[in-house]
Image: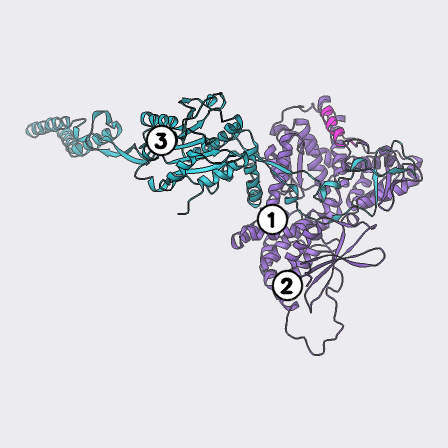
Chain colours: A cyan, B purple
Amino acid sequence: MAHFIDRRLNGKNKSAVNRQRFIRRYKQQIKQAVSDAISKRSVTDLSSGESISIPARDITEPFFHQGQGGVKQRVHPGNDQFSPGDRIPRPQGGAGGSGKGDASADGEGSDDFVFAISKDEYLDLLFEDLALPDLKHNQLDKLVQYKTVRAGYRAEGVPANIDIVRSLRGSLARRIAMSADKKQQLRQAEAELAELELAAVPDELARRALLERISELKQRLAAVPFIDSFDLRFRNYQKKPEPTSKAVMFCLMDVSGSMDQATKEMAKRFYILLYLFLSRSYKNVEVVYIRHHTQAKEVDEQEFFYSQETGGTIVSSALKLMQEIIAKRFNPQEWNIYAAQASDGDNWAEDSPLCAELLSKQILPAVRYYAYIEITPRAHQSLWEQYERLRASQPKLALQHIREVSDIYPVFRELFKKQAA
Amino acid sequence: MRSVALSKGPCLPDGPDWSFELLTQYQQEIARVAAYYQLDTYPNQIEVISAEQMLDAYSSIGMPIGYHHWSFGKKFIQSEQQYKRGYMGLAYEIVINSDPCIAYLMEENTLPMQALVMAHACYGHNSFFKNNYLFRTWTDASSIIDYLVFAKNYVSQCEEKYGIGEVEDFLDSCHALMNYGVDRYKRPQKISMAEEQRRQQEREAFLQSQVNELWRTLPAKANSNPTEARFPAEPQENILYFIEKNAPLLKPWQRELVRIVRKISQYFYPQKQTQVMNEGWATFWHYTLLQHLYDEGRVSDRFMLEVLHSHTSVVLQPPYNSKHYSGINPYALGFAIFTDLRRICEQPTAEDREWFPQLAGSDWLESLHFAMQNFKDESFISQYLSPKVIRDFHLFAITDDSQDSSLEVSAIHNAEGYQQIRQMLSAQYNLSQLEPNIQVQQVNISSDRALTLRYTPHNKIPLGGAIEQLMRHLHRLWGFEVVLEQLDHNNQLSVLARCPTPHHP
């Protein structure tokens, strides 16, 4: 009358499709929530999922029900003080003592609908419609590295590449081919000999001829070599070009006295977005932090964002250092190089032309993309003007101006927008 | 007197860990005792599932198979969130009104819990599904799973043909009117899956031809009389049915979707009407069956203590002024009424002889089965709520008239109040008073094809809900103007809403 079924091993994501449907339907609201979140959230846990909040009134399913008012009669348990005819002041606000849960049912006074999306869903939404700039048409001629792959077998090669199984299989085949007919003749001769010896009067002459033939066959069989250079097979390798998956991201930041912590935080968010974005396209992304005031220095992340410095600003020092590091460690033939420079726009006026020259001659040819963001509420200064001039001839260079935190994500989208083909 | 059939044997192991062998042993013991109490059930199919799977089951309102729709995804995300944050425990079981009766047990339950759940779901609810008159007439346990499979496949076929968005929007509109897809008095027919598929083809063609006939634009015969017949001849309460059969512009597949939503709504209708009875019955039996096993010495003290611990929290009724209070607990009320029913039969007092002359002293098992088979919440309460239960619950009635500045206590648990409380509590479970009464009133067949719905308020309670939005859904289904009017207690007709909203020149 009853049987048990163990369903625990069945798929548990039966609702996955419905969940996807939900996200599909409310994509606009969710995207809005995602881009809001990037400016509100602490930067360190940006790679985890995101908690999304949608106004509950947007997603209610309407249905007809009885409204407030009219005559309602309800029975409640636990009478501890009332007698018939008692009058009770109407409970104000909320369902209170009357116990009617109607307040939220009409879809107005209720909280936002909050739920979590996974890291992947989050990144998909965040970077939807974004593409790596200037990658496609360079991919084949420049961004290749060679990988050695197995490509069958060949008859010549170095001993280290001998494939033993293949070679012995060849040897076995050759030995069978070379000895099969002789073995058959041998068996035949031995059978004849046995027959001869059984006869009443053995024919000595025929017997001797047979014995001679047998020994000759045995000799010839023994002469078939166990292994021959003809049998040897060597593993073959080929070099196959494939697009490199290595990328390096240079973070350049001005840490002179004019950059306060809030400005650095903004820059940091931009770097984190860039890092997340790059890590979706490349397997491993290295990050190089270069900070500068009048001198540039390569530092670790902690120092980059949080150590205090003062002094003037010479941007070209950072560019020079970056160029040295590229020359030393990151061959542009192998690495996809991205750079993002953040600054409040201050620079020695004499230095700015030098920066523009360094960029156009040395750095831009080596990198995939160079983004300059200026975080300042003030008007642009010489550095921006120099870069602006440069941009006309250099498609790899992008300039954006950030005034406040909420600008970061739109600016980021603008920088990496999919270019119409 | 019935003699208790004592089958002496060793105590069954009491866990806490369970295994399938132990579950089978317990199931057999419970089945034996259930047969002794004449519980007539469908065969049981007991499925052990994990917490995640339980969440899945939640989001599809307990249906083992459902078509895809974003609202189920929303429900899933909601329950997942609540569960993860610890706002909500998961049910120990879900049971489905099907033949065989499918019951889900949670993997995390201890052995005593599994036994409790089996007694509750596989013998309590199961026998209720099989024998209560509402379920017998309204649902067909043997075909529901097949129908759900059919519905799921049909919806995904439609999605392939007409696009996910199109189907989803249309289902939204149907869902908004789901409560109005029920025949309250007419009995639905029972059909099998094969039959359903065959008929679906026929229906498509036939329905369309009927609709065409209704809306033909050829000039009517010359002798048509000027006072033309009303359509529909009488008001219709099943709005979805009316739309399925008569909406002028729906495509055949859309009519079928309306039908699917309507059928599923109909399937759940008896459950909505028998909450107190169904839970009370199941709770009464898990208590009685396990207590019987304990009296026989088949289960240990430790086992029974854990069972009683869970049982008491299930039947807990917080008072009106508790912060945990959220209305009357159907488990508690139902359990109390059934338990008291047994007491009235076995040990009647003078009061019981006055209130229940035909029950006092009768065979309790027979009386209980009769009560379970022939009532729904509303009639069950008005028939069986005894003064003792009213006293035990300290029930009192509040009248809330919005004309009045304060609430009035209209009755309490005393001799004068029993009748009134019984009547009011019964009305509180009367679905036709809880759901707004909206019916299809008229269609202007010969002119602008506008559909008029009429709301008749009960106790002057106004209509709630996002009416504008609902009107747009109705408009999507009907395809022409939809008017919602209200007939108030003074017989005054007024228009509540209109879609599309009239634009003033």
Q: Earlier in the sequence, mark 1 or mark 2?
A: 1
Horizontal side of B274 relative to B217 (left or right) equals right
Q: Is residue B429 left or right of residue B265?
A: right
- Give the residue furthest to the bottom: B222
Point out the frontmost of discs 2 and 3.
Answer: 3
Q: Which mark is residue B248?
A: 2
Residue B299: name its quadrant: top right
Look at label 2 and name its amino acid. Answer: Pro
Q: Residue furthest front?
A: A350
Q: Residues within 10 Å of mark 2 (few under 14, many from 20)?
A: some
**Residue hosting label 1:** B146
Residue B319: percent from left, percent from top: 82, 32
User: At which x and y percent is residue B3?
Assistant: 80, 31
Chain bearing tag 2 is: B
Q: Quadrant of the N terminus of chain B?
A: top right
Q: Which residue is mark 3?
A: A354
Q: Nearer the viewer, residue B76 or B370?
A: B76
- The part of the image, by quadrant, that contains residue B87 is top right
Comparing labels 3 and 1, the label whose residue is closer to the camera: 3
Which residue reaches farthest left?
A205
Describe the element under mark 2 as helix, strand or loop. Answer: loop
Q: Main secondary structure of the magenta part?
A: helix
Residue extent of the magenta highlight: B304-316
Q: Are marks 3 and 1 on the same chain?
A: no
Pick whichever, A79 or B491, lies toward us: B491
Give the percent coordinates (x, y) of residue B487.
Answer: 80, 57
Q: Are marks 2 and 3 in contact (CB under 8 Å)?
A: no
Three-letter amino acid code at the position of disc 1: Asp
3D distance between C-alphas at marks 2 and 3: 76 Å
Q: Amino acid at mark 3?
A: Leu
Name the subunit of mark 3: A
Seen at 52% across and 25% down, the residue is: A261
